Image (spheres, grey):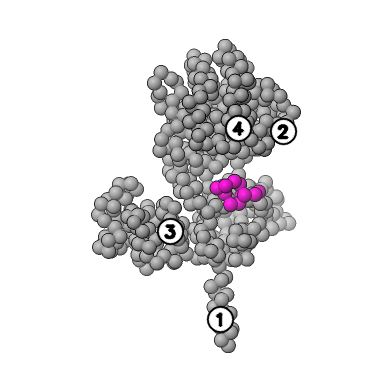
Amino acid sequence: MLQSLFFLLFLFFTQYTNASPILQIGDLSTPVDKLRSCKSFAGSRATARCVCCLLTSNPDGYFTDKGVTHLCTTQNDCSETIIENLISQTKAKDLDALVIKLKERHIQNQNIPVSPKALSDGVFNSQGLKDFLVSTSMNNKFRAPDINTYFREAKCLEIKQLGDGGKQTLQIFLISAMKRCGLGFRHEPPRFWVLKETKKFGEVKNLQTLMASPVAAFDIKKTNRNPQFPAIAFPVETFTYVDINRTPHHMLLMDAAPGLPFAKIIQSKDLEKLNQASQLIGERLGALHKTFMQPSKNKILGPTVVHGDLHSNNIFVDQTSGIVTLIDVETFVKSFDTLSTPAVDLFMLYGFATSHIQTTQRIAHGLSQEEWHNNFFKPFLQGYVSNWPTSSRKEILKELKSMFNSILTLNKIFKNRFIAISYPNFIYGVKRYANPVFDQLIQHPSLP
C-alpha cells in the first residue's frame, strides 16, 4: 500500500516538467513556483527586486493590485522612486496599469507543461514536439486561435529537425500542417512555420521590443505591409518550458519565410536568378536604410537602423512575388539604441558572400570572381541606390566606394563582428573586383 502511494506521488510530480510561469528580468530567470524570495532572486538589483515583488507577492503568483504595491514598498523591495521610474519607463497610467505592463514584459505565462517523454537529453525531439503541439492545441492552450486549429490533428502535422541553428539557438524545426487532411477532404496547400528553441531570454526580449517599434510595420503577417520594404519574420507564438534541471527553454514559432535562403540561390549557379535576387535584396535593404537614416555632415548616407547579422542565410527571397524576408532580426535592437553606419549590413552581406572562411556561404564553385561580382554585387548596388533620386545616385555610389575602402571603417566593424570573414580576403576582393564595379556604375549610374 505504501509503495503504491509513493508510486502515485512519483507519477504526479514527474508527469510534467513544469506548470509554473517563468519570471524573467534581464538575465535573471526562475519558475515562479520555485521563487524563495525576491531578495535572493535579484540581490542588489533594486529595480529587478521591485519588479519581482510586484509580480509575485500575491495569491495568484504573478498578478497583483495596489495593495501589493503598497506591500512591496513597505517591505523595502520597492521605493517610491523606483515605482515612479517604472511608471515612466512603461508609460503606464497608474499602478494597476504598471503591474499589467510588467506582467506582459516579464512573465512568460505561456509556460506550458511538457511531459518528460517529449524530451531527449533535456530538449525536444521531433516526435515529442509533435505530441506536445497536438495535445496543447487540442486544449486550446496557444494564444493564436489558428495555431490551435492547425496543430490539433497529428496526421496533418509534419515536423522536420533542421539542426542547431548556431551558437544562440539550441534547435530549429520546420513544421508543416493542414487543417484537414483525411479522406473525403479536399487537400489544401500546407502552411509552414519555423520553431526556434533557445535558452537565451534576450532574444525573446529583443523581439518583444522590436514588435513595439516602427519596424513592426514590416511584419510579414501584415496584409497591408508595404512590398517595397523587406518583410520581417516575427513570432506568432512564444512559450516556455523548463527541463529536468529547471532551466527555462524559450520557443519562438514564426511563419516560414517564402522562397529560398539567398545562400541557396548563390549555390544554384543560376546567374539569371542570382542577378534578380541580388537586385531585389538591394532595393529592399536600401529602402529600409533610407527610411531610418539620419542626416550626416556633407554626406547623403548617414547612420541608420541595421539588421546587424545580415549574412546570406538570414535573407530569404521569393523571386515570384518579389518578397525579401529578413530572419533572426533580434539584432536590430542594438541599432535602435544607437544608430549605426549602413556599412554594418553592407560589409556583412558582401563579406559572407565573398570571403567567408567556410564554404557554406561563399560564392558558388565554378564561378569566377568577375562573374560573381557582376551578377551579385553590381545588381545589388543598382538596387540599393535606386531608392534615391537619379541625380543623387552617382554621389551615393562614390560614398559607398569610399566606405568599402576606408580602413578606419573596416577596422571598426571587423573588430566587433565578422569573426567568420577573412579580413585580408575581404580587402583583396574590394580592391581587385568590387572597385571596378563601383567605377563602372559611377560613370554610368543607370547602366542596366
Q: Position of residue 357 (x, y in %)?
A: 64, 35
Query: What residue is rendered at 29% in x and 53% in y?
Result: 83
For marks 2 and 3, the one nearer the N-term is 3
Q: Which residues fall within the magenta stretch?
A: 162-172
Q: Position of residue 217 (x, y in %)?
A: 47, 38
For marks 3 and 4, the one nearer the N-term is 3
What is the crowding at mark 2: few (fewer than 14 residues within 10 Å), some, or many (at least 20)? some
Q: Nearer the viewer, mark 1 or mark 4?
A: 4
Do the residues bearing badges 1 and 4 touch, measured as CB atoms within 8 Å? Answer: no
Measure how far apart labels 3 and 4 are at the Cα level. 41 Å
Measure how far apart labels 1 and 2 are at the Cα level. 61 Å
Do the residues bearing badges 2 and 4 touch, measured as CB atoms within 8 Å? Answer: no
Do the residues bearing badges 2 and 3 touch, measured as CB atoms within 8 Å? Answer: no
Measure how far apart labels 2 and 4 are at the Cα level. 23 Å
Q: Which mark is residue 23?
A: 3
Query: What residue is rendered at 73% in x and 31% in y?
Result: 365
Measure how far apart labels 2 and 3 are at the Cα level. 46 Å
For marks 1 and 4, the one nearer the N-term is 1
Q: Amino acid at mark 1?
A: Phe
Q: Quadrant of the C terminus?
A: top right
- Residue under label 2: 268
Q: Quadrant of the N terminus?
A: bottom right
Q: Magenta part mainly helix, strand or loop? A: loop
- Residue under label 4: 422
Q: Amino acid at mark 3?
A: Leu
- Can you see residue 220? no
Q: Position of residue 147 (x, y in %)?
A: 57, 53
Measure how far apart labels 1 and 4 are at the Cα level. 61 Å
Q: Which mark is residue 6?
A: 1
Measure how far apart labels 1 and 3 are at the Cα level. 31 Å
Q: Which mark is residue 428?
A: none
Q: Amino acid at mark 4?
A: Ser
